[in-house]
Image (cartoon, helix red, strand yellow):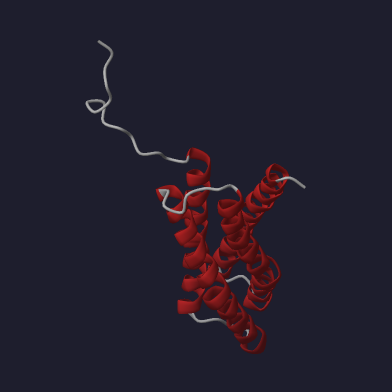
Amino acid sequence: MTVWHSRRALLVAHVLAGAGLFGADVVLLVLAASGLDAAAPETVYPAAARIGTLVIQPLAALALVSGVALTVVGRRSWSTPWILVKLSVTVVLAGVLVTVLVPRLGAVADTAASHGQVSDADRRALVIAPAISSTLLAVNAALGVVKPRRRTNSSTVPQPS
């Protein structure tokens, strides 16, 4: 497999991971919003916890690994601002999703299953987290498509005589 083919395969994996992660975040947001509306917490939160464990964690890892691999294989510069922003957002987001959100979903699911209720603070937090995550993923997607470049000042560009 050539470098070009490897890059294409990595790009497909990266785009699918990002799109899947965005979709899973939206599903978590819908479930958490349902939990705010007094839907059965013993149903809503265990479903959200399963999505976190089975979908969010692997997709977050795949998005991070494939993004780093794309930068290496594609010979992109690590100093390119939009790459650094995307990498920073992905590292922080993957870390928070895997180490904070997914364990919290599990804890809330356990509480909901054993007590049949969830605190208002947990309900609100589980709406805010996927809303922020979805927004950051949308920013990352926009950066990946637009790839902003530094503009040169027109006065520094030599003008034809």
In percent of width and height, residue 37 lies at 55, 67
What's the residue at 27%, 21% (across, down)?
158
Q: Measured from the top left, where is residue 80 in percent x and y? A: 42, 48
The location of residue 127, given as percent across then percent down, is 50, 66
Residue 45: percent from left, percent from top: 63, 74
Please report the residue visible at 68 percent of the width from the left and 42 percent of the height from the top: 4
User: Which residue is the extreme one toward the bottom?
Assistant: 114
Q: Nearer the viewer, residue 159 or 116?
A: 159
Question: Residue 55, located in which quarter of the rendered image?
Answer: bottom right
**Is any part of residue 31 visible from this angle?**
yes
Judge by depth and name the residue closer to the eye, 36 or 145: 145
In-image side of 46 versus 64 (left or right): right
Along the line of sight, the residue nearer the viewer: 10 or 112: 10
Q: Is residue 27 visible?
A: no
Which residue appears at 55% of the width and 81% of the height? 118
User: In this view, which residue lies farthest toward the left?
Assistant: 155
Instruction: Name the residue located 40 percent from the left edge and 39 percent from the top edge.
Output: 149
Q: Total marks drawn?
A: 0
Viewport quadrant of the C terminus: top left
Side (left or right) of 152 relative to 128: left
Q: Residue furthest right?
A: 1
